[in-house]
Image: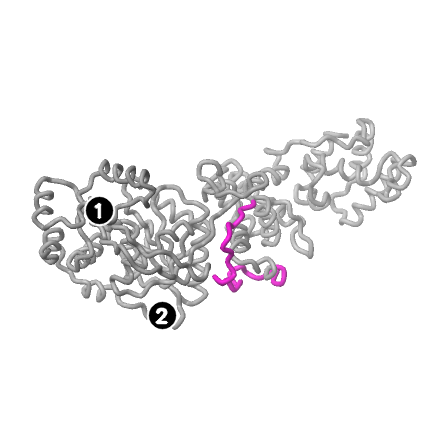
C-alpha cells in the first residue's frame, strides 16, 4: 500500500503540516508549575452539576498555580446540539462565579489558542488525520451501521468483546484500488485508527486515583466521522496538546477510554497531560446510594439551583466539602475567610461517589447568607427576583430602605439569625415586611383565647410608644404580662403551670403573629422599627 497516495486521495485539500500547527500554537509562557485546565461541555442545552463540579476543580488548580483556565465547546456531535446551548453554558458558569481566562464566549472567542469550538477546528484535525494515514496508522472504513450491528450480534453470540478490530475490521486491508472504487460509488466512510492486536498493559498515573493499569487498546476506533468531524477521542487529544493543557479533569466514565487516548498521545509523540478522573455524583435512595439521574433528579441540572435561588457562594462552599475532605475543618478554623483562600488539592479528593445531600446544601446556604452583609444579601436577592420573581423585585425596588433595614434585623454578632436559605425562600420569609404580601398564617397560642388576645392588644396599644428603646419597650411588655396573670419568667410557668394563664413566651408570640404572621420571627422591637409606627399600629389594632 502506498500510504502517501492514500493520504492524498482522502485529504487532497490539506496543505498544512504538523510543524505549521506547532508553530501556530507555541508552548505557553507561564511560571514553573502553572497548570492549564479547561472544561469541555457539549452544547446540548443541559448543563449539569457535574459540569460545575469539574469546572471548580479546573479553576482552582489553574488559578492557585497562576495558570490558565479556559472554556472549550466540544460540539462534534451535531445531532445533539441545541440552539442557544453555548450561551446557556456560559451564563450558568457566570451565575455560579466560574471565570475563564480565555475560550469560547457569547460573542465569539477570547484567546490565542482558538478556535475554542471543535467544529471550527476541522482543518487542524485533518492535518493529523492525514499524518496518521501517511504512516499507515489510519484507514477509511466503509462499513454500514447494519454491518456493524451484525458484527456486534456475532460477537455477543461468541462472547467476544464488541467492536471493530482484527478479523471484524473488514475494510482494514483494502487496497487503494478497492478504496477508490468505494469512494467512486459514493459510499460514506469514516477514518479509523489501526489498533494494535497485541501488547502489554498500559499504566497511567491519575492525579486523583493513583496508578491505573489496563489492557492497551486493540480497537480500530473512529478518528473522523463521515462528515469529517472528529470523535471526542481524536479531538480532545489534539486540542489538549495544542491548547497546551497540563491537566484533564473529567468524570470517571472516561477511564475505560484511556487506552485509546494514551495510544494517540504516544503515536503522535506528544506529552500526555495529567488525567484527573473525578468521582460520580451520587444521592441517597432509601438506604443505598445511586448515581444522580437526569430523568429522575431535578437537582442534577444547574438550572435547578438557579431557579431555587441558591447563591453561588453556597454552591461553592457545598461543592468544596465534596471536593476536599478537610474543607469543613478549614472553614471552622477560618469562619470569615473567602472560600477562594482554601488551599484545594487533588490529593484530598475522594475516589468513591460524591454524595449530593440537598439538606446539607440548604444548611450551608443558611450559614453563608447569615454571614453576608445586608447589602450583599439585598443585591443577590434582587438580582434573582429580577429574573425569577418580577412581582417581588418590584416590591424591593418600591421599598429599598425598608428592605435593607429588614435584612439587617438579627444580622451580625456571634450568632446571627439563619432565616434565609435561598433567594426563593427569602420571598416567603420576608413577605411580612410588605403590606402587599402580608398575611397571618399561624394561629394565636392556645393559651391565649379571643378575650385574652383582645385584652392584651388593647393594653399594649394604650402604652405603646414607638420612641421607646428596646429595654423600655420590653419593660412595658413584662408589666402587661404580669398584670394579665402570665408568668414573666418562663421557668416559673414551667415549674408551676397551674398558677399562671401562660408565660411571657405566649405573650410575645401573640405580638410576633400579629406583626409578622408567624410565631417564628425576628426580634419584635426591631421588626416594628423596620415597619414604622403607622404599619405597626394598624396591624396590632386588628386584634384589639
Instruction: Give x and y (percent) for residue 209.
Output: 46, 59
Quadrant placement of the C terminus: top right
Asked if residue 385 is among those painted magenta in the image, a careful observer would answer: no
Question: How many badges with numbers are in the image?
Answer: 2
The colour scheme of the drawn protein is one colour
Tell me the quarter of the picture where residue 205 sits.
bottom left
Residue at point 80%, 46% (across, down)? 474
- Seen in the picture, residue 443 relative to 399 is either above or below; the reply is above
- Could you tell me which residue is drawn at 21 percent across and 56 percent down? 124
Please, what secondary structure does the residue beneath circle 1 have? loop
Question: What is the C-alpha distance between the residues marked 1 and 2?
Answer: 45 Å
**x then y, percent, for residue 516:** 68, 37
Residue 97 at least partly seen: no
Q: Looking at the figure, which quarter contains the N terminus?
A: bottom left
Q: Position of residue 309 (x, y in %)?
A: 52, 43
Residue under label 2, please give it: 30
- Residue wearing tag 1: 169
**In this picture, residue 265 sits left or right of residue 347:** left
Indicate whether residue 341 is drawn in magenta.
yes
Residue 5 visible in the current orientation = yes
Quadrant of residue 295 within the rendered picture: top left
Q: Magenta stretch? A: 332-357
The earlier-in-sequence mark between 1 and 2 is: 2
Left or right: 438, with 494 as reference point: left
Q: Are marks 1 and 2 in contact (CB under 8 Å)?
A: no
Q: Secondary structure at mark 2?
A: loop
Where's residue 290, x and y in %?
A: 51, 42
Work out whether residue 99 or residue 436 is closer to the camera in this orientation and state it. Answer: 99
Q: How dense is the environment of label 1, judged by Cα within 10 Å: few (below 14), some, or many (20 and up)?
A: some
Q: Quadrant of residue 246?
A: bottom left
- Which numbered dot is residue 75? none
Amino acid at each position: 500500500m502506498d500510504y502517501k497516495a492514500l493520504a492524498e486521495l482522502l485529504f487532497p485539500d490539506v496543505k498544512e503540516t504538523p510543524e505549521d500547527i506547532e508553530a501556530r500554537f507555541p508552548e505557553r509562557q507561564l511560571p514553573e508549575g502553572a497548570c492549564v485546565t479547561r472544561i469541555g461541555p457539549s452544547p446540548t442545552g443541559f448543563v449539569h452539576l457535574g459540569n460545575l463540579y469539574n469546572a471548580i476543580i479546573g479553576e482552582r488548580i489553574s488559578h492557585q498555580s497562576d495558570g490558565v483556565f479556559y472554556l472549550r465547546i466540544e460540539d462534534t456531535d451535531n445531532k445533539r446540539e441545541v440552539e442557544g446551548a453555548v450561551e446557556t453554558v456560559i451564563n450558568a458558569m457566570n451565575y455560579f462565579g466560574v471565570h475563564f481566562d480565555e475560550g469560547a464566549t457569547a460573542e465569539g472567542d477570547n484567546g490565542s489558542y482558538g478556535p475554542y469550538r471543535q467544529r471550527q477546528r476541522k482543518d487542524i484535525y485533518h492535518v493529523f488525520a492525514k499524518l496518521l494515514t501517511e504512516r499507515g496508522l489510519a484507514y477509511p472504513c466503509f462499513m454500514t451501521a447494519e454491518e456493524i450491528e451484525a458484527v456486534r450480534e456475532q460477537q455477543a453470540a461468541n462472547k467476544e468483546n464488541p467492536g471493530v478490530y482484527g478479523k471484524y475490521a473488514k475494510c482494514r486491508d483494502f487496497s487503494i484500488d478497492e478504496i477508490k472504487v468505494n469512494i467512486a460509488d459514493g459510499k460514506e466512510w469514516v477514518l479509523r485508527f489501526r489498533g494494535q492486536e497485541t501488547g502489554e498493559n498500559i499504566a497511567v498515573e491519575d492525579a486523583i486515583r493513583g496508578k491505573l493499569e489496563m489492557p492497551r487498546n486493540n480497537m480500530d476506533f473512529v478518528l473522523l466521522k463521515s462528515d469529517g468531524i472528529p470523535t471526542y477521542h481524536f479531538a480532545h487529544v489534539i486540542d489538549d496538546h495544542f491548547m497546551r493543557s497540563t491537566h484533564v479533569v473529567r468524570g470517571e466514565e472516561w477511564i475505560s477510554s484511556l487506552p485509546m487516548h494514551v495510544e494517540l498521545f504516544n503515536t503522535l509523540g506528544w506529552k500526555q497531560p495529567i488525567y484527573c478522573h473525578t468521582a460520580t455524583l451520587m444521592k441517597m435512595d432509601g438506604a443505598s446510594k445511586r448515581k444522580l439521574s437526569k430523568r429522575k433528579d431535578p437537582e442534577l441540572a444547574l438550572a435547578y439551583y438557579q431557579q431555587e435561588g441558591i447563591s453561588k457562594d453556597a454552591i461553592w462552599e457545598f461543592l468544596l466539602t465534596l471536593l476536599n475532605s478537610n474543607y469543613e475543618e478549614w472553614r471552622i478554623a477560618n469562619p470569615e475567610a473567602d472560600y477562594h483562600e482554601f488551599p484545594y488539592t487533588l490529593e484530598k479528593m475522594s475516589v468513591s461517589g460524591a454524595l449530593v445531600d440537598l439538606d446539607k446544601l440548604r444548611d450551608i446556604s443558611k450559614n453563608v447568607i447569615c454571614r453576608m452583609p445586608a447589602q450583599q444579601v439585598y443585591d443577590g436577592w434582587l438580582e434573582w427576583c429580577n429574573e425569577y420573581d418580577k412581582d417581588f423585585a418590584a416590591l424591593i425596588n418600591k421599598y429599598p430602605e425598608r428592605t435593607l433595614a429588614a435584612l439587617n434585623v438579627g444580622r451580625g454578632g456571634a450568632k446571627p439569625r439563619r432565616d434565609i436559605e435561598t433567594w426563593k425562600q427569602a420571598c416567603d420569609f420576608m413577605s411580612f415586611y410588605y403590606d402587599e404580601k402580608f398575611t397571618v398564617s399561624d394561629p394565636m397560642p392556645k393559651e391565649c383565647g379571643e378575650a385574652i388576645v383582645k385584652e392584651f392588644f388593647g393594653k399594649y396599644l394604650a402604652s405603646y410608644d414607638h420612641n421607646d428603646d428596646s429595654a423600655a419597650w420590653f419593660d412595658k411588655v413584662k408589666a402587661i404580662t404580669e398584670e394579665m396573670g402570665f408568668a414573666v419568667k418562663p421557668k416559673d410557668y414551667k415549674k408551676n403551670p397551674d398558677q399562671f394563664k401562660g408565660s411571657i413566651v405566649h405573650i410575645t408570640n401573640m405580638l410576633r403573629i400579629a406583626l409578622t404572621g408567624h410565631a417564628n420571627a425576628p426580634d419584635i422591637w426591631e421588626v416594628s422599627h423596620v415597619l414604622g409606627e403607622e404599619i405597626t399600629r394598624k396591624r396590632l389594632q386588628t386584634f384589639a
